[in-house]
Amino acid sequence: MTSVDGRRAAPGAGPEVLVAAAAAGDQGAWDELVRRYAPLVRSVIRVHAMEPADAADVNQTVWLRLVEHLDRLRDPGALATWLATTTRRECYRQLRIGRRTQPFDPYDDSPIAAALVPDPDTPDEQVMRAERRQALREALAQLPPRCRELLAMLLGDPPASYRQISERLGMPVGSVGPTQARCLRRLRESPALAALLVGPAPCEAGRR
Amino acid sequence: MEVMRVWPPADDDALLAELGTALREAEQVSPAYLTAARGAFAWRTVDADLAIAELMFDSACDPEPAGLTRSGGDGPTRALAFRRGPVTLEIEVTGAGIVGQLSPATGGRVTARTAEGVFDEAVVGPVGFFSLAAPPPGPVRIDAHTAEYDLATSWVVLA
C-alpha cells in the first residue's frame, strides 16, 4: 500500500492510493485504475440501451471527467460509486440528447431490443448489481495469493477438480474443500464489500 | 424482491457463481473502451493550469430554472451552464453552432476542443459574448482565457 507506482502497486491497493498516484502524474497508476474499473463503467453503460457510438462517447466522457476530478474527489476510496453515478448520469444525458438513438420496437430482434426485453429489473437494481460485481473483484484482489489462485481454478473453464487444485497448490485433497470455504468466508467479510451505496439521482448535472 | 435479499450470498455456490460472473465481465471490455480510457490521462497535464468550471445546468436533463430565456431560431436549442466560483460560462447549442456568454466579461479568447484536438477558437466580445462552430460528436470542452482568469469547462457531449 505504500507504493505510489501503479505498475508495482499491490493487487489489493485501495483506489485512494491509485487516485493519489495518478493525480501526481503516475501513468501506471492510471492504467491500473482503468484496468480495475473499466468493467464497471462498461456494465453501467450496458444497463442503458444505446447505440455503440453513443456508448463509446459516454465511456470516454466518464474517463475524461475522472482525469479532471482526480485531485478533487471527495472520497477517493468510494471511486466505484463515483464512477457508477457519473456513468449513469452521462448515459441519461446521452439518451436525452437522442442524437443517434432510434425509436425501437421491443419485439424486433435488434441487439438493443434484445438487451432491453429480458431484464425485468430497474436500472437502479442493475447498476447496484454492477457495483456489487465490482466490489467482488476488488475483494478478490485483496485476498491472499493462495485464496485467489484456488478460487480462480474453481472458476476456470472448465473448473479445476479438487485433485488438480491439490496438486497445483500442494495441499491434501481433503483440505481443498475447507480452504475454499475459508477463502469464500474471507471474501464475504472483505471491507471491499461493506458499505455499498447506491448513487443519487441520475441526472444531477455536475454536482457532487 | 431479488435486490432485497441478503448480499453477499451466504451460500458458497451462489457466491462463487456471482464471483465467476464478475470475473468474466472484467474480460469483456472492448479494447476501444480501454484505449479511450487510458488516453484520457493525457489531459491531466494539459489541464494542470486550468481551473475546471463544473456543469451546473443542462436543459437536456435538468428541469428549467425559472426565468431562463432562449434565443430560439435554429431548431431545438440546448442550454448549458458551467460555473467556477464567481465565473459562469453559459452556452446554447443548435445545429448551427454554439453561442455563449462568459461573465464577468473581460474580453479574452475561447477554445473549443474534443479529445482529438481543437475544433474552433473565437474572440470573446467586450460584453462576454462568443460564438463557435457546431460541435462534433463526442465529449467537448471549452477553455476560456481572459486577462483575469483561465478556466476549462467539464467535458460534456454536446452533439
Image (cartoon, coloured by chain):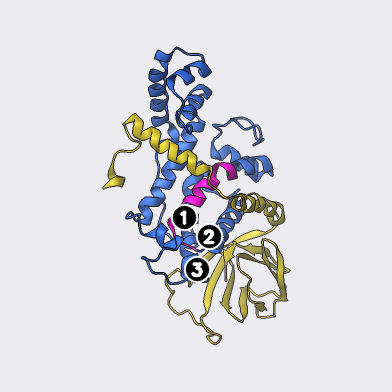
Chain colours: A blue, B yellow
* Secondary element at image label 3: strand
Residue B20 as seen in the image, left or right of residue A168: left
| Circle 3 residue | B57
Please rate how many residues cluster around mark 3, counting C-alpha atoms within 10 Å: few if below 14, some from 14 to 19, many from 20.
many
Q: Is any part of residue A14 visible from this angle?
A: yes
Q: What's the CA distance linking mark 1 and mark 3?
A: 25 Å
Magenta-drawn stretch, dominant element (helix, strand or loop): helix
| Circle 1 residue | A46
Q: Quadrant of residue B73?
A: bottom right
| Circle 2 residue | A55
Mark 1 falls within which chain? A
Is the Cβ of the residue at disc 2 closer than 8 Å to that at disc 3?
Answer: no
Q: Which residues are magenta?
A: A34-50
Residue B101 as seen in the image, left or right of residue A194: right
- The type of residue carrying mark 1 is Arg
x then y, percent, for residue B42 = 70, 52
Q: Quadrant of residue B62?
A: bottom left
- The type of residue carrying mark 3 is Phe
Taking the magenta stretch, the answer to whether it contains residue A101 is no
Instruction: Count the numbered circles shown.
Output: 3
* Comes first in the chain, label 1 or label 2: 1
Q: Is any part of residue A194 visible from this angle?
A: no
Mark 2 falls within which chain? A
